[in-house]
Amino acid sequence: MSRTASVSRKTNETSVAVTVNIDGTGTSTISTGVGFFDHMLDQLSRHSLIDMDIKTEGDLHVDDHHTVEDTGIAIGQAIAKALGDRRGITRYASLDLAMDETMTRAAVDVSGRPFLVWNVNFSAPKIGSFDTELVREFFNALAQHAGITLHIQNIYGANNHHISETCFKAVARVLRTATEIDPRQAGRVPSTKGSLA
Ligand SMILES: [Mn+2]
């Protein structure tokens, strides 16, 4: 059974089309019109090994907010759809990810219960032209719509590009592990409730 899904989402603010393959190789085609965000999504795909085709046309004349949030919603929806009833998955993962001077921790429960704990502070409002506060908006949209409990903590770091990038890479790595099929689950839903959907 292939764990792939496509989602199209159109509002007055954005038009988003996303296709994901959970069991991919980390290949992506990404175009949101926001260069820094494309760079971050490329990391998300590459290090989760989830293939992602992402095309967003948003109201960038306003700012990047709708584009980033709605892309997060669509990626989350596509991941939830591709995971289906979450049968056989590993479910939990956590990781400390280092990049130069920065260390960021991510933990995920692919639980069906959306929750974001965000313990990350940026020392500047912008990375280039990108609003650093949008990093949280993206992960909140992702967690809410993928149906995952996601905790992200920047432990230390100085460079805001690195702090953002470690968030995306750490989440990518824990998503990879937690969504992988655990052969010892033998196709069962990993919950004593019997449901994660
Ligand atoms: Mn970078």
Image (cartoon, rainbow, N blue to C red):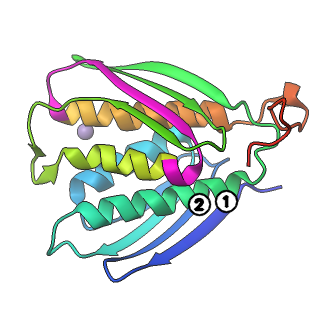
34 versus 155 height, above or below: below
Q: Quadrant of residue 62?
A: bottom left
Q: Is residue 155 magenta?
A: yes
Magenta-tinted stretch: 144-160
Quadrant in which the N terminus appears: bottom right
Q: Can you tell which mark lies on residue 169?
A: none
Q: Residue at coordinates 44% horizontally, 44% vertically from top-left?
A: 44
Q: Residue at coordinates 10% horizontally, 54% vertically from top-left?
A: 129
Task: Indicate the position of residue 34 as horizontal and vertical percent values.
Answer: 23, 61
Q: Is residue 154 magenta?
A: yes
Q: How packed is label 1: few (under 14 Cα within 10 Å), some, or many (20 or more)? A: many
The answer to whether any part of residue 5 appears in the image is: yes
Task: Indicate the position of residue 113 as horizontal and vertical percent values.
Answer: 61, 42
54 versus 181 height, above or below: below
Q: CA distance from mark 2 to mark 1?
A: 5 Å
- Say which residue label 2 marks: 78
- Say which residue label 1 marks: 81
Query: Helix, strand or loop at disc 2?
Result: helix
Task: Indicate the position of residue 184 as horizontal and vertical percent values.
Answer: 87, 25
Query: Helix, strand or loop at disc 1?
Result: helix
Considering every residue shown, the one lying at the far bottom of the view is 12
Task: Indicate the position of residue 193 as horizontal and vertical percent values.
Answer: 83, 35
